[in-house]
Amino acid sequence: MSALALARELALLGAHAIVAEKDHDALDPAAGFAHGADKFRELGVRMAAHVDARPSSVERLCGRLGLSPIGYWLVTLAAAGELNPEVAAALSLLAEDERVHVLTPISFARLVRSALGVPFAAALDEAAPGGPAERLGLIERADQGSGRPLTHVPLRLTPAEMRIQLLDRIPMLEVTRLAVGREAPSHVLGLPDSVVRGAAAILAEEKVLCIRADAARIARQLALDIASVRGETALVVRGADEPPDASDVVKLRGGLVVLDLFAASQARGFPDAYVTSLRADPHAPTFIALGPRNAATQHIATVDASDLDLSGRARLFATVVGPGDAAADLAQRFRVSLDEIRSAARAARTKKRLADASFNSDAPLTSNELAAEILAQGARTMGRLVTHLPARARFDDLVVPSVVRDQLRDLASYHRVTSRVKAGWEAFDRQVLGRGLSCLFSGSPGTGKTFAAQCIANDLGLNLYRIDLSQVVSKYIGETEKSLSRVFEEAEAGHGVLLFDEADALFGKRSEVKDAHDRYANVEVAYLLQRMESFDGISILTTNLASNIDTAFLRRLKFVIEFPMPDASMRAELWEKSLLPKTQRDRDLDLTDFIERFPISGGNIRNIGVASAHLAVASPRGLLSTEHVVRATYRELEKVGLARSRDDFGPLARHLGKGSG
């Protein structure tokens, strides 16, 4: 017989009993029903046999979710009341209230006391507010503000559970409001075997483990490794500003639960009380909580995770691209965890399937295919405080003096070998600050500072993120530091170079303290110094004048590169690169006068090239002429306020209109 049929029979038997006993004034609810005792016992035997047979409904509620047999019948009785009008009427009689057609804790306790012989208090505890079924999100109180005693407050199924019972279909996963990622166990560990197995042993003893790390991906990798050695799927609950609802967490089964509490810790501090209370819940699964390095975890067993080294990252990449140089190169470029690698691999394979329906999804990916998706994945993690700039420029496209080009190549090489230096130099690990690669590019507007940053990002195969200072700097005390912290954390996960364009406003000289605003402005500068040095990546500041930057910054920067205004030979190269190809130019176009007469920056020349190209394409012949370049040059000089008289143009002035100069 089905569980709902047994529950219907129990409710109707209880209704008959309460009607028969309604004239008895000395009834003891804790003793159950005296009327029909034999029928209750016989039904109880069948109910117990049903549970012992372990049908799918019992496996789900008792096996997967951890309810006791009493809790199982609580949910089943509530479902029977929702699905069967006769049961609803019987429950109204049991509640002794014609307005109530659902179960109440006391009526449930009397029913199971009579049928199963369980102690009345134990049955009441199961159905009372805050009981296991309610914590699991299966039952809810229907009328909390009525002023009724808690034992008489009506109980009903939650909407999510109602749909499951209505369809009579056991879900593969429990319905929750959580964003859960499922990561299958891996045959390869990212972190050292001894560390992983030691942490797994602690988890086995304590049932809960906190992992602290400098970044969420580091803590997450150790959690995934622990799940792998346990042979379990990791159920990763993504972070939010508030810890996940406990009633949803306790419903997670079929794997090792991993709670990412980094965002919650940043918003309000590590939620130690939440983790402690969740651990105390007898129905809570074994779980791992992830938090930042400074999390105060009190009496919870805690492990501090170190970052993945180069060999660990190479092992993880080898699971997708195979062992060898490709995995080593990817490990050199990206600091990622196993779940990020798998996500990027899925995206790359999906893209290949869209391009070629016959593509074998098990075929290995190339390093370039995987790298492209890792970069795209990283760009999507960045918030509104940054702009993702295209980084397709090459050093061959950059027109600067050879000494500047050499400095830029040294900068890229410095970053490229940092992992190897770290692996082979013990003293590097003892540096708390000064590990990041912070640089200053100074020079007049248009001399190639931002373009050089694009070249570096492209050469290293990284994203380039420009910081929107208008969004970062706040007039409210403490808000600038919060915004900067978020930017650096996102950049570490976004595999990118940080570009603070025109950074004078944020990185200017620290002022003499005259009031509270000066004091906090200096705090912002000091914080930025510390955060740039601890940032495990490249941060580039650009300024039009190096003297505007605080000398404390200059002392602690790894590279300070000056971009001069281009000389005549550089301007000649810039003009050639910026204008339409020679095949689309008029034969009479001679650039000599433009090169010699206008000592302007590469940015100005590029603007002239774009404007003149539009003029040429719109002309009848479609060829770039001297007149087009002259008109575009005049407009650019006018825009930036430079000299633009006919004398300045010399022989080129004949191409100017009558109203010019």
Image (cartoon, rainbow, N blue to C red):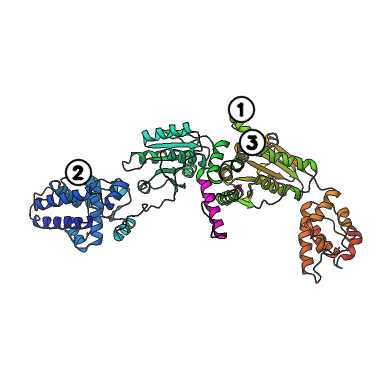
| 647 sits left or right of 400 in the view | right
Q: Is disc 2 placed on a helix, strand or loop?
A: helix
Residue 383, compared with residue 513, is above or below; it is below
In the rendered structure, which amino acid carries the disc numbered 2?
Answer: Ala
Cα distance between the residues tagged 3 and 2: 65 Å
Q: Is disc 3 placed on a helix, strand or loop?
A: helix
Please state the horizontal and vertical placement of residue 89, each as a whole percent of the image. 19, 61
Please state the horizontal and vertical placement of residue 540, each as a whole percent of the image. 67, 43
Looking at the image, the residue that sits furthest to the bottom is 620
**What span is colored magenta in the figure?**
339-367
Q: For mark 1, what is the residue? A: 427
In the rendered structure, which amino acid carries the disc numbered 3?
Answer: Thr
Q: For mark 2, what is the residue? A: 121
**In the rendered structure, which disc, 1 or 2, sits on the residue that comes first in sequence?**
2
For the C terminus, the quadrant is bottom right
Q: Residue at x 22, y 47 (%)?
A: 52
Residue 418 badge: 3
Judge the density around disc 3: few (<14), some (14-19), many (≥20) Cα neighbours within 10 Å.
some
- The answer to whether residue 323 is visible is yes
**In the rendered structure, which disc, 3 or 1, sits on the residue that comes first in sequence?**
3
Secondary structure mostly seen in the magenta stretch: helix
Please state the horizontal and vertical placement of residue 605, each as a whole percent of the image. 79, 55
Q: Is disc 1 placed on a helix, strand or loop?
A: helix
| 108 sits left or right of 505 in the view | left
